[in-house]
Image (cartoon, rainbow, N blue to C red):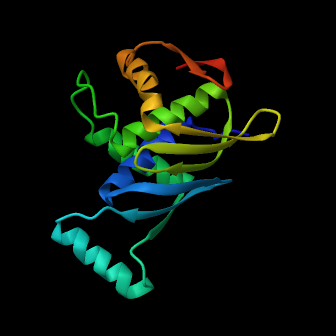
Amino acid sequence: MAATKPYDEDLRAIGQALEARNISVFELKRLADRYVIEGTPQETSSLRTKVRQWYLQLRSGSIAESLTFRLADVEKLSQAGRAKRSRPRHLPDFYSVSNTLRTVGAYLDAKGVELVELHKRPISITLSYRDKEGHQQGEDRTVSSFYNLFLELYGKRGQQKTLTVKHPNSQPSALTS
């Protein structure tokens, strides 16, 4: 049913890879052994990004990027990201792609569901997931609706914690990590 590894770790690592490509609006699909992402890099003044966008448009007629991460790739991304992280007492930026995705992953973990798709837009996220009974469900939420969970995650980092996930249309769930 759910990934062998918590979604918060997988989604954070994928978020870091998307940040490196300047992608913040995307569609993510979770398949049996991989994640597939379609997204378009944001406009930037970076020469490197402009060259990459020009090359993608020349090659495929579009600047949209399609990325596939096998589970082993995600583990490598996670290890690389862990090595780069520092400042453990510093509250990171919730609105960064990696932190938003980590928080959404913790939410999915707490609900005990299997991710099917995630659509990230500038101010909203649409989740599609399968519950324990195998029924597919969906939620359309603002990014900011996950902020309190983010604060709870970071406020209790480094210690045993139980998180209660509340959403108007669902039963509260608990996450212990």
Q: Is residue 131 left or right of residue 70?
A: right
Q: Is residue 45 left or right of residue 57?
A: left
Q: Is residue 150 left or right of residue 108?
A: left
Residue at (60%, 43%) from the top-left corner?
A: 127
Residue at (42%, 55%) from the top-left corner?
A: 25
Q: Position of residue 5 (x, y in %)?
A: 58, 37
Farthest right residue?
133
Q: Position of residue 59 (x, y in %)?
A: 40, 86
Among the 4 quarters of the image, the one containing residue 56:
bottom left
Residue at (64%, 19%) from the top-left corner?
A: 173
Residue nearer the viewer, 13 or 45: 45
Q: Is residue 51 above or below residue 137?
A: below
Name the quadrant of the N terminus: top right
Among the 4 quarters of the image, the one containing residue 98:
top left
Residue at (28%, 34%) from the top-left corner?
A: 93
Among the 4 quarters of the image, the one containing residue 88:
top left
Q: Position of residue 72 (x, y in %)?
A: 52, 53
- Total of numbered circles in the picture? 0
Q: Position of residue 2 (x, y in %)?
A: 68, 38
Q: Is residue 58 above or below residue 73?
A: below
Residue nearer the viewer, 164 or 7: 164
Q: Is residue 106 above or below residue 3?
A: above
Q: Is residue 28 above or below residue 101?
A: below
